[in-house]
Image (cartoon, rainbow, N blue to C red):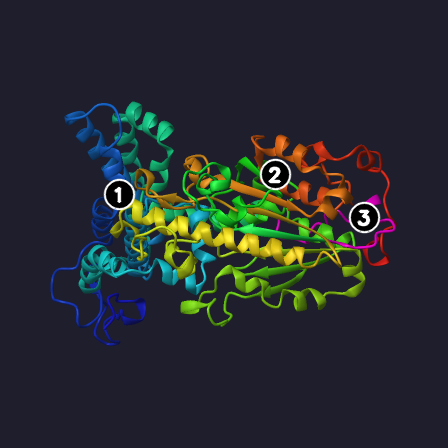
Amino acid sequence: MSLIAFPSALRRPPAGAGQAPASAPFSAPSAPSTAPLHPARVIVLISLWLATACNVPLWRAVLDLPGERGLGRIAFLLAFMVLVCAGNVAVLGLLAWRFTLKPVLAIAVLAAAFGCYFMSAYGIVIDTHMLTNVLQTDAHEAAGLFTWRLPLTVLALAGPPLWWLQRQRVRALPWGRRLVRQAWLVLGALAVGVLCLLAVFQPFSSAMRNHTQLRYMINPLNSVYAVGNLVARPFRQDSGPLIPVGADARLGASYTGQTKPPLLVLVLGETGRSGNFALNGYGRPTTPELSARDDLVTARNVWSCGTSTAASVPCMFSHLGKTGYEARSARYEGLIDVLQHAGLAVLWVDNQGGCKGVCDRAGESNTASSNVPGLCPDGECLDQVMLRGLEDRIAALPAEQRARGTVVVLHQIGSHGPAYFRRSDPSRKTFQPECGSVSLQECSQQQLLNAYDNSIVETDHFLNATIRWLQGRSAEAQTSMIYVADHGESLGENNIYLHGLPYAIAPDVQKHVPWITWLSPAMQQRMQLPLGCLRSALGEQHLTHDNYFHSVLGLMDVRTSVYQPQLDVFSGCAGTQRAAAAGAAAPAPASARG
């Protein structure tokens, strides 16, 4: 028998047995013969469990707040706890009716149990972005989060209330009486909540204003809010037709009479912390191969659009920038579309969880499920697998477009956690001992850092291999590479792990990302971009993902009304010849016109 007595198991007295009184129980026949509880009492008892046992991370955070200690802090915590319980009662009172009572309460208990585990284990909070990440998590990522602690925690938090709920008989009230009682229940809960809020208004408002993460730790109301926000999103952001962007795109003067087309590889990094790259001044040798080169430009002051792949990648490839993207009311095409409007060949190669919609109208190849010996242990491939057969994938693109130029996006698995130890080849595990578990709390801070830094060593090897691959194509193309990570990562600092915290409260390590550029001598000459100037201009300049869209267009010399030269990181070093030709353009190809 299942833990939950769902409506199909609820039975009325058989026909002919007489009319059951209003207080008669409705329950499974096997339920114990205890007196049935009023549905309001069931809601209150479950809400009390949710507010106490399932909110341990919240109460720990409250007890750790700076300021008054002792009885004042305990009084604030108790009032806050009653406020959370009242909020649970109000929300569940609106959702839990006769036939939905037990299912709704069971879902709330399970959601709270899972939420409590992940907040306790990784120091995360639950908001709309985190829920979006959960919905977009693939099987490999989900498996990486599964540890023996998860089922034990969920069983401990959800088992007792679900067992009690399954066995409990509930009074069946007529609909009219139930409606009145439920309305009083919700209003009473709101009144209690208001009284508690007034009693502790000053410390509560201060805590919410100065420690905004507490808002996203109120469990499971945080999940209810996130679901509601996610469901309402289509009404705020038009789900109608896709709006074209850069339909006027044309190729600039550099394409006139070209003997070799440009070939740009955009390496879309995953979970890269700028501060852990030796190229950016980190004290550990995490980038031995790139550090040995003298033809790179690295920007050390770059900030992401979001703290998760789902938030950052669509924003990076949008012309709107962070502010405009988050406030958008319609769906727009992105960078990939603009490049294709200009008549260029575009290919997306993915070794992770997909392109989040930005490559839907371009050629895409997924290598995550490949089975290449030596590169794909345990069903997950190291990033070098994307270079295998890349020439053939490019050759399959339309020849007319390839003759103009090609842009290839390589989407890394990079340093995706929590299984950092799976992100590096055994021959490149420079730092030991490393954390070999997905239960990050089981590892010391140093072991966790070692595993993460080994993944950066692997990225270093992959980027250098990509540059060497491009150098091998110098006879037929003018080549270049841009590497930018989508977001950073927390590695246990302040007991926070992984990423995905709301941007306003996320630590800098989740937002500070690396940006590395390599230009072949032919590409430097083509675009009049001396490395010395770029190093001086980009070294410490404050950059964000807002610059990405326009910088790629600038480097590929694509002219369009949506291009903003002030956001192009390369424009300040462009030679006078390029600047003078900025208004000129090669004729747009027939396939790219109107």
User: Which residue is disc 3 drawn over?
Assistant: 251
Dot 3 and dot 2 residues touching (CB under 8 Å): no
Residue nearer the viewer, 593 or 227: 593
User: Which residue is disc 1 drawn over?
Assistant: 57
Mark 3 neighbour density, 10 Å: few (under 14) some (14–19) many (20 or more): many
Whether residue 241 is in magenta: the answer is yes
User: Which residue is disc 2 drawn over?
Assistant: 546
- Residue type at mark 1? Pro
The residues tagged by marks 3 and 2 sit, at their Cα atoms, a distance apart of 22 Å
| Earlier residue among tags 2 and 1 | 1
Quadrant occupied by the N terminus = bottom left
Residue nearer the viewer, 557 or 464: 464
How would you classify the magenta stretch by its main secondary structure?
loop
Nearer the observer: mark 3 or 1; the answer is 3
Expressed as whole percent of the image width and height from the top left, the position of residue 264 reads: 68, 52
The answer to whether residue 505 is left or right of residue 152 is: right
| Earlier residue among tags 3 and 1 | 1
- Residue type at mark 2? Asp
Mark 1 neighbour density, 10 Å: few (under 14) some (14–19) many (20 or more): many
The residues tagged by marks 2 and 1 sit, at their Cα atoms, a distance apart of 35 Å
Residue nearer the viewer, 493 or 116: 493
